[in-house]
Amino acid sequence: MSATSEPGRMNSEEADVTNEPLVEAPADTVAGEVVLRLTDVVKTFPGVRALDGVQLEVRAGEVHCLLGQNGAGKSTLIKVLAGVHRPDSGEVVWRGEPAAFANPQAAMRAGIATIYQELDLVEDLSVAENAFLGHEPRRLGFVRRGHMARRTRQILARLGHPEIPPGRLVRHLPAAGKQIVSMARALSHEARLIIMDEPSAVLAHDEVGNLFRIIRELTAQGIAVIYISHRLEEIREIGDRVTVLKDGRTTAANLPARETPTRDLVSRMTGRTIEYVFPDRPADDPAGAELLRVEGLTRHGEFADVSLDVRAGEIVGIAGLVGSGRSELLETIYGARRAEAGTVRMGGRALRPGSVGAAVKAGMGMAPEERKSQALLLGEPIYRNVTLATFGRYARLGFTDAGRERAAADRIAAALELRPRDVRRPVRTLSGGNQQKVVVGRWLLGDTRLLLLDEPTRGVDVGARAELYQVIRELAARGVGVLLVSSEVPEVLGLADRVLVMREGRVVREAPAGELDENTVLDLVMAGSLMEGAPA
Amino acid sequence: MSDTTPTAAPERAAGLPAQSPPVDPAETAKADARPGLSWWSGDRGEGAKRNLGLLATLVVLVVIGILTRPDLYGDASWVWGNTLTILKLASVVGVVTVGMTFVIIGGGIDLSVGAIVAIAGVWSTTLATQSYGAGGMIFSALTVGLAVGVINGLLISYGRLVPFIATLAMMVAARGLAAEISDKQTQVSNESFINGIATTKLLGIPLLVYILAAVVAAGWVLLNRTTFGRRTVAVGGNPEAARLAGIDVRRHTVLLYALSGLCCGIAAIMLTAQATSAQAAMANLYELDAIAAAIIGGTLLSGGRGTIIGSLLGVIIFSTITNLFAINGLSTEAQNMVKGGIIVVAVLVQQVQFRSLTQFLARNRATTT
Ligand SMILES: Nc1ncnc2c1ncn2[C@@H]1O[C@H](COP(=O)(O)OP(=O)(O)OP(=O)(O)O)[C@@H](O)[C@H]1O
Ligand SMILES: [Mg+2]
């Protein structure tokens, strides 16, 4: 996927944007100078060696990419840098001096700002309060609210989101909006190093372009960026050098980001070669009887008059920008939101609106968009999270059977390459990508007939992603219908049999995946009036 | 529990390699025996660790007793008798606390438990009810408790009232109704079977203690071994995730408050038996005792985590303190101050949290070496 920034998207608001630099450029930064050096850093958790001797060298003004499978230790590494974890051993040299940050505040004061993989916003504070959390501008002990709101508005405008009101509670923002706010927080500091842990995972295509534009501005000022992503195309586009982690160890350092062949990168990450391909579609038309029929579904301000159908054994993909109403549509079909108009039928029978129970009983399952707030019991063991929707089936007379549940979860763990494999660990201790596998894995158990997947591969690494595609394909081959929402157009096109394109809450195009290509879809997704007359 | 229909083979999980091997019990056992992971291998580990701390607290209290009254503790038969006294003291609040623990793990709070005990006690001792005999009294106490609990649950889950407000209102209303029914009089229980519950001993142990043991055992099984317990943890831990996984959060919330009400009904019978009477002011401040016991027992006020054994130990710690003051002839005022202090310490410990504590220790180790 090529994420070129679209000049057309940065429309009228551009005029408001002040030209003062987003982050004060540190005066004493020499471009190309090594600002950060890690030597033999080790960090263990009970039972896990998350970092097992990591080397890393970051220069001022570069975008240094970290690559590695789920659970390789990337997030742990950046948490060490951000002062969240203390390393057990090893050396961190920050701007020529050995550093040991006692807490995140210390790291921030030293000039390291971090955008974490798991959002760490306070839901009941406003956007501005979150952006300046812990370093509110003050005068005589009082927070300068006006000043804070102004600065926040500025930063948001530079991030391409002048429409987010600084006073809005974060709770009321969609996932992508929250990601923007956590980026705004990182940019509200005077940072010399900005760490971004999978920032693009929750961003739509055009927003990634925006992000890259900002990264280029930052690096032009001599600020170093550590960038983590599972999308190799992004690393090719924005990265300067790449360090690869595998099982907590540096397996390759300072590779050139553009020239290193993909094969090399993947084999250093995984120890094997993976052809990043989608499973073949079955030759004959696989789709059977109609499973789901949605007619005229409407929720004011979210989506309007959406009609679609999914047949047994068919994978239907929905492409669209974040905010085009995709997730809301999925949740409404599932009964988690109540439709204002329209019907949802499963196998010909209308479902009671606004009832998840009815949808589940009819054979639906949904992997929601936000794993932490919508899907996981973080303190509970992995197996209990995997069986959260099915534990009743393993029970006899209301008595749970932990042994059978663990065995079932074990098989899910094996099929999705969950690491670590021990399903009795609390989900909280899993890496982000592995938590995502738990969310999707939940619905691979039991007899789900229609699977609603909202960004199923968010944060999942290259290898596991291929496994997941394979699993979804096999499900379809067994007659399960799949409705897939993804921000990654290639994923929709590669996996789905049929594609719906949504824009601003409406379906603007429906076609077999074979008839569409990436650029057509991107045009449809973003274009304004141009495509208004397109066949729906 | 609705989903008890035995499904043929849920493992026939879609999407898994068709040749997925059948469950090998030996392999599961092997996995269980894996070394080095035991302390966090599930919820039990952390809970057990906390419960050890509670046991230690209990030991300290006993040692204080021995130090302050060595004369009494020299007498083995007194020690046995005193132990039974403590357990008997714990029995009524203990039963209420089991219900409270479920409510709190499920993300709620029940401030009306004391009032429910009172109204159940008063209802079952009216002359009209007593005319139906002991069976009628027990039935009406349990039914009234259950019914009030269901009303709480309906107000909270379908009326969308905050649990704190709904049960606070119920606390006031139920006491008022109890005063109305009893005409503010003490109603004497003439039923010798009921009164006998408090005085009967089996194998030298009071029946009340057996009732507590039975309720605790049932509560433990319900929480740890049934789908009801699993739903409770899910609903309290992350209601949105529970809902999207197809759990009927509202229905389950009603059941939780109903369970709490039922426990109050049982407690009402026990308390009526002890006093051979009931009145609108009975079980005063039980809500505080029960919440405090659950909290110091390690139940997270925000829901999603807690243990029955911890709650039991919490209740026993409180009744041991009461007993300690009694045998030393000290006032109840001082006793309440100590109880308050213990609650504060317990909550502080909960906030520090095990994880950050170990992190803190690790950090100190790192800086000293
Ligand atoms: N708090 C914790 N307690 C125990 N183990 C942990 C903890 N945090 C991380 N781990 C383990 O450390 C390892 C590295 O995790 P980390 O989050 O750094 O992976 P990652 O490279 O960021 O993966 P992803 O791509 O999925 O985000 C994993 O095995 C994980 O389970
Ligand atoms: Mg990570």
Image (spheres, rainbow, N blue to C red):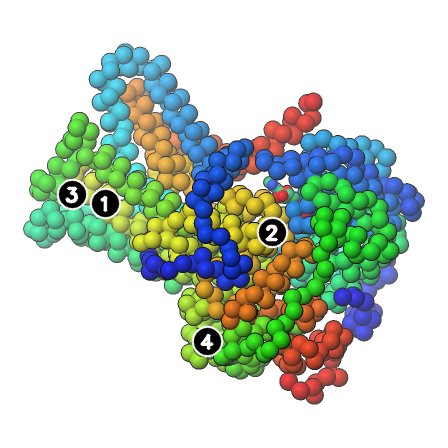
Residue B66: image quadrant is top left
- Which residue in the structure is indicated by mark 3? B186
Q: Residues within 10 Å of mark 4 (few under 14, many from 20)?
A: many
- Which residue in the structure is indicated by mark 1? B266
- Which residue in the structure is indicated by mark 4? A346
Q: Residues within 10 Å of mark 3 (few under 14, many from 20)?
A: some
Give the mark, 4 or 2, whose residue is nearer the N terminus. 4
- Which residue in the structure is indicated by mark 2? A417
Residue A218 showing in the rendered view: no
Relative to B328, is B142 above or below?
A: below
Measure how far apart labels 4 and 3 are at the Cα level.
61 Å
Pointer 2 and pointer 3 on the same chain:
no
Measure how far apart labels 2 and 1 are at the Cα level.
50 Å
Left or right of residue B30, residue B153 in this image = left
Q: Position of residue B327 (x, y in %)?
A: 28, 20
Pointer 2 and pointer 1 on the same chain:
no
Looking at numbered disc 4 in the image, what kind of residue is underneath it?
Answer: Met
Q: Position of residue A379 (x, y in %)?
A: 51, 45
Task: Please give the name of the residue rendered at 87% of the width and 41% of the height, measured from the top-left corner.
Answer: A34
Give the mark, 1 or 3, whose residue is nearer the N terminus. 3
Left or right of residue A430, residue A10 in this image = right
Task: Please give the name of the residue rendered at 80% of the width and 44% of the height, measured from the top-left corner.
Answer: A252
SS for tag 3? loop
